[in-house]
Amino acid sequence: MSPPDAVEIARRLIARRSVTPADDGALPYLRGLLEAAGFAAEIVSFAEPGMATIDNLYARIGAESPHIVFAGHTDVVPTGDPNKWRFDPFSGEVAEGMVWGRGACDMKGGLAAAVAAALRVVDGGGLKGSISFLVTGDEEGPAVNGTVKLLEWARAKGELFDHCILGEPTSREKLGDMMKNGRRGSLTGRLTLLGKQGHVAYPHLARNPIRALAPILACLQAPALDAGTSSFEASNLEIISVDVGNGATNVIPGEVRLVFNVRFNDLWSPESLSGEIEKRIEGAAHGASYDLKFDSTNAVAFLTPSGAFTTLLSDAVEDIVGRRPVLSTSGGTSDARFIKTACPVVELGLVGQTMHGVDERASIEDIEMLARVYERALTLYFPAFARK
């Protein structure tokens, strides 16, 4: 019996209502496919006080190097009102050359392509090393009981990876037009400007913290944090919330709460960036009282330098779809930020224009072509990275 095709796998995954932290059978389905092909597969659960227990999947076939790992996630974001969708968001409906449903492009379609490609290579006798899968159910959630712990678990078992392909939807308009060889970091800050509440008719008895807001906002926006690098865009700070919590028209508020997020490049660490921001605020506050806190972050900027692995993946894309992908570090965070500590990682996947949206969908042709790209990458990979 020939291995199932990528579209069939994608549809079966989409039918699982695996909104974080639920799994709804998505990981057991993948485990069954991989075990039938000869993979040793195990579902591993991790827990943390106050958080949901998360299931994760690790599977491997082969015992020799080179060892390439496909990473991904089966969890998806909520659908919102399902009545606003053209089809049931968990139906995996096929229409107009598309597979429709939550996770179609982020990233059940990409994961299905990777599984289909690996099954073909194994079935065709092309395995000349090892292939593994690291699949989490916690990428769209807190990302605490997912890939980061699965990597620690695998490391404790002596699993060593040479390279990783992460199937996030990296393509912009056409399959293979972009792949990600790095990601920016993310840092969230929370600033409270402290005043004294009072009656607007008696301002001398109060202290309005809003008066300090304008110079604070200005200092956070200018000068620019940096001008970017050859591999990264300039770091960018955005104010995402300003709130005084005041519903009255005759009350001077006692505080102003401000939240901001920075997407930063590899010129900064969370520590150096928070230090720069604190210095700016202190200079602009002019003695006004404030409290500044930063959320803990595990999203640090990283770069997989262009080289033999990125070239091989670019060659595979060009061989199958006829275009060469642009290397990029744009976009949000992904689990690549954890995988980078284990091995070089590159993200290559479907077109992501509908991810997280109503009527999320992916092209049937793209899913099938992505599976062929991954299969081509595997056939190129083993001889290219064989230990001499």
Image (tube, rainbow, N blue to C red):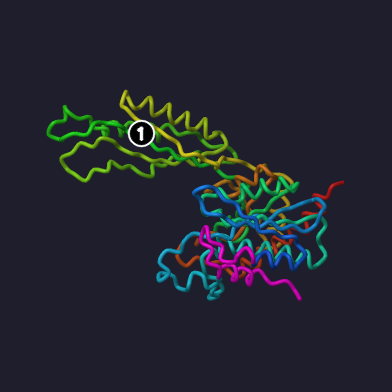
- Label 1 Cα neighbours within 10 Å, binned few <14 / some 14-19 / many ≥20: few
Secondary structure beneath dot 1 equals helix
Residue found at x 42% / y 63% = 80
Query: What's the magenta region?
Result: 1-28
Q: Is residue 249 left or right of residue 189?
A: left
Report the residue marked by disc 1.
218
Residue found at x 16% / y 27% = 204
State whether residue 201 is above or below residue 145: above
* Whole-percent x, y for residue 188 in the image: 45, 40
* Magenta highlight on residue 166: no
Q: Is residue 290 left or right of residue 320?
A: left
Q: Is residue 301 left or right of residue 283?
A: right
Q: Which quarter shows the N terminus?
A: bottom right
Instruction: Give the farthest residue toward the front.
Output: 49
Residue 162 visible at all = no
* Magenta highlight on residue 7: yes
* Whole-percent x, y for residue 365 in the image: 62, 69
Residue found at x 81% / y 62% = 126
